[in-house]
Structure formats: structure tokens, C-alpha cells
């Protein structure tokens, strides 16, 4: 049965399964890091927007 799928032995089959599970774990880790990066990027953009509003010079209204 293993030869039908292209594996010469059960050890080859095990290596293929371990490699596949490792790829899935790495993909999951990549997705998690990507989501955290996007969340931090969004927070940074909000803080920079708040900083630019807070640091804008006050304009005095002309008295008249």
C-alpha cells in the first residue's frame, strides 16, 4: 500500500507525515505572528495620529 503512494518504507511515510505537520505548525506560527504584527501596526498608527493631533499648534481666535 505504501508503494502505491510513492513511499518505499514506513520510515519514508513517517518522514513525510512529520514534514507535513512541521509545515502546518510553521504556517500556524506565521499566521499568528502576522496577526500580531498587524495589530501592533494598527496601534502604532493610532498613537501616531493621536500624537499629531496633540502636537498641532493652538490657533488663537482673533478678538474683535
Image (cartoon, helix red, strand yellow):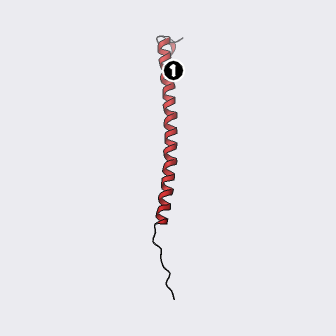
- Residue situated in front as seen by the camera: 58 or 30: 58
Q: Residue at x 49, y 42 (%)?
A: 34
Q: Secondary structure at mark 1?
A: helix
Q: Residue at x 47, y 18 (%)?
A: 15
**Residue 32: image x %, image y %?**
52, 38
- Residue situated in front as seen by the camera: 39 or 62: 62
Q: Residue at x 51, y 52 (%)?
A: 43
Q: Quarter holding the N terminus?
A: top right
- Residue situated in front as seen by the camera: 26 or 60: 60
**Residue 39: image x %, image y %?**
52, 48
Q: Is residue 6 visible?
A: no
**Residue 18: image x %, image y %?**
49, 21
Q: Is the residue marked by circle 1 packed among few (<14), some (14-19), or many (20+) residues within 10 Å?
A: few
Q: Is residue 2 visible?
A: yes
Q: Is residue 12 above or below residue 61?
A: above
**Residue 36: image x %, image y %?**
51, 43
Residue, far bottom: 64
Q: Is residue 7 above or below residue 43?
A: above
Q: How many marks?
A: 1
The residue at which mark 1 appears reads as 17
Amino acid at each position: 500500500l505504501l508503494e502505491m503512494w510513492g513511499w518505499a518504507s514506513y520510515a519514508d511515510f513517517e518522514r513525510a507525515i512529520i514534514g507535513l505537520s512541521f509545515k502546518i505548525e510553521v504556517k500556524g506560527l506565521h499566521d499568528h505572528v502576522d496577526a500580531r504584527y498587524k495589530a501592533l501596526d494598527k496601534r502604532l498608527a493610532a498613537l501616531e495620529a493621536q500624537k499629531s493631533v496633540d502636537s498641532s499648534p493652538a490657533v488663537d481666535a482673533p478678538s474683535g
